[in-house]
Image: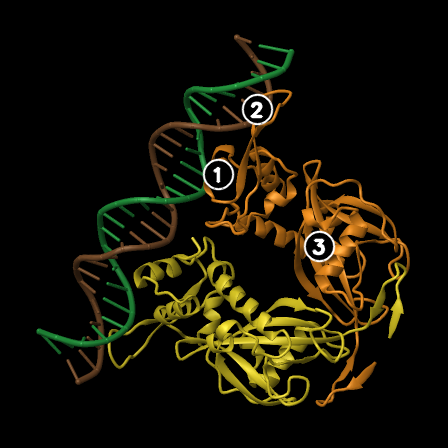
Chain colours: A orange, B yellow, C green, D brown
Amino acid sequence: MEYEDRRGGTVTAAWVTVDLTIFTIRDDALQVLLIERGKEPFEGRAALPGGYVRSNEALEQAARRELREETGVGSRHLHLEQLGTYGAPDRDPRGRVVTVAYLALGPDMPEARAGTDARGAHWTPVEEALHDGGRHLAFDHDVILRDAVERARTQLEYTTIATAFCSEPFTISELRRVYEVMWGQTLDPSNFRRKVLGADGFVAATGERTMPAAGRPAVLYRRGVEKRLVPPLLRAAAR
Amino acid sequence: MEYEDRRGGTVTAAWVTVDLTIFTIRDDALQVLLIERGKEPFEGRAALPGGYVRSNEALEQAARRELREETGVGSRHLHLEQLGTYGAPDRDPRGRVVTVAYLALGPDMPEARAGTDARGAHWTPVEEALHDGGRHLAFDHDVILRDAVERARTQLEYTTIATAFCSEPFTISELRRVYEVMWGQTLDPSNFRRKVLGADGFVAATGERTMPAAGRPAVLYRRGVEKRLVPPLLRAAAR
DNA sequence: GGAATAGTGTCTGTGAGACAGTATAGG
DNA sequence: CCTATACTGTCTCACAGACACTATTCC
């Protein structure tokens, strides 16, 4: 499956895969689901979960299938978006493989189960996965992971996806904690509350309250309908 | 080049193409470069320029090559970014073809020349290309074009890419015109100027001035070094 | 001077940062 | 009472929208 195009270039067919960057917040840290590869290439190395796109499958459909297979969680409750496509000619030693990377966000999930080609799947703090500059993950997954982190951090500024990290119902404090963990900075509780409640459709009150061990009960909210956050909630460092 | 994976799905290799959405502003309208297809499928229909990714070519490299071939303009002066990847199983009647769409922005360019597989290349107002809901372009290019327009409009809010539409040097009024055309709304000249000049690295003064036929000469600027625009310049409708 | 376009100044409302103060629970 | 957490109010400054005004060119 190779031919010469009319301009003198050689064209080869490629395998198409999807790779998933699945984020959650656990133990006050951003964690990513990594598998340990069970076969060559990169056997034994950590990698993002993923797999081949099947013949009659759309790209996002393949991503949702992998998500289900790797996490055991129905993808309906998760935020899923296309992150970007990576296709350097030498990114996979087996041949030309182009991968479409997806970004998935969800609340703290049950411990992942291993996929078919993997020895095990584990939640790993992103800081650990990327420590001293990366080059720990298989293929170009360091790059993909770095891009995914940056995308997620930026998305928090301009969209309401932070709610995707919270299991419903949630409190404003829990939502604030998402921002604090993702950005590595504390936010003023008072100003944060004002911003979130003042933005139409960010969250919706349930009428319920928490019954905490200590402290005043907090009002509970669900995700709102609005996807964009206008005006945005900017990181202090970015200003 | 087809096999059954270990979970019972059939996997086929795919052809990988890049498609380009090349925008410019001409005659006070957003225009996109479209080719007329010279062969089946969709022979005679308008389409986005694009082509196969070659065996030893990176994706962006392929995009730059196509850009050069279609516009005759060196891609160094153009803004180029990956837009997204489209891979519905039936998007190309010839078989499985996954396309990586790129968004390119440039100042008004010389009339395009036809590519190898095309009868001709023409600048077309986007409004015309998408009129009454689309379904004019080949493949799923209507969808890609719509996504590209939306992406470009949004990027104007949060980044400094509007300068990519201006040929250097340019005036603040020319830059404002870019926003007005892209958003379909007029902006207050005074407030716009204050915003642009107040944002570090958006534009850089050249020290030169225009010599217009009528009116006061305007100060000329070049693109600044900053890519992000913080705080953003939001569309009125989006607020 | 008049037309045309560029550029300045200023008033006002909104929203964000800082932070003091109040509320409601358990012990 | 105290502690812990949730929530409210307020002061101030930065910034955006509206818009009046001034500047510089050609005719």
Along the line of sight, which residue is nearer the eye, A8 or B169? A8
- Count the labels in the image: 3
The residue identified by callout 1 is A197
The residue identified by callout 3 is A145
Q: Dot 2: few (<14), some (14–19), or many (≥20) neighbours within 10 Å? A: few
Q: Chain of mark 1?
A: A
Quadrant of residue B190 in the image? bottom left
Rendered location of residue A212, percent (x, y):
63, 23
Residue type marked 1:
Leu
Q: Chain of mark 3?
A: A
Secondary structure beneath disc 3?
A: helix
Instruction: Tell me: A230 left or right of A31.
Output: left
Q: Is residue D24 above or below residue A1?
A: above
Rendered location of residue A17, percent (x, y):
78, 64
Which mark, by number, is residue A217? Answer: 2
Secondary structure beneath disc 1?
A: helix
Along the line of sight, which residue is nearer the eye, A152 or B2? B2
Q: Residue at x 47, y 58 (%)?
A: B229
| Mark in the foreground, 3 or 2 | 2
Residue type marked 2:
Pro
In whole angstroms, how far apart are the C-alphas of marks 3 and 1?
A: 32 Å
| Mark in the foreground, 3 or 1 | 1
Secondary structure beneath disc 2?
A: loop
Residue type marked 3:
Leu
Q: Residue at x 41, y 70 (%)?
A: B181
Rendered location of residue C24, percent (x, y):
52, 19
Mark before the other along the chain sequence, 2 or 1? 1
In whole angstroms, how far apart are the C-alphas of marks 3 and 2?
A: 37 Å
In whole angstroms, how far apart are the C-alphas of marks 2 and 1?
A: 18 Å
| Residue B221 visible somewhere in the drawing | no
Q: Residue at x 72, y 90 (%)?
A: A6
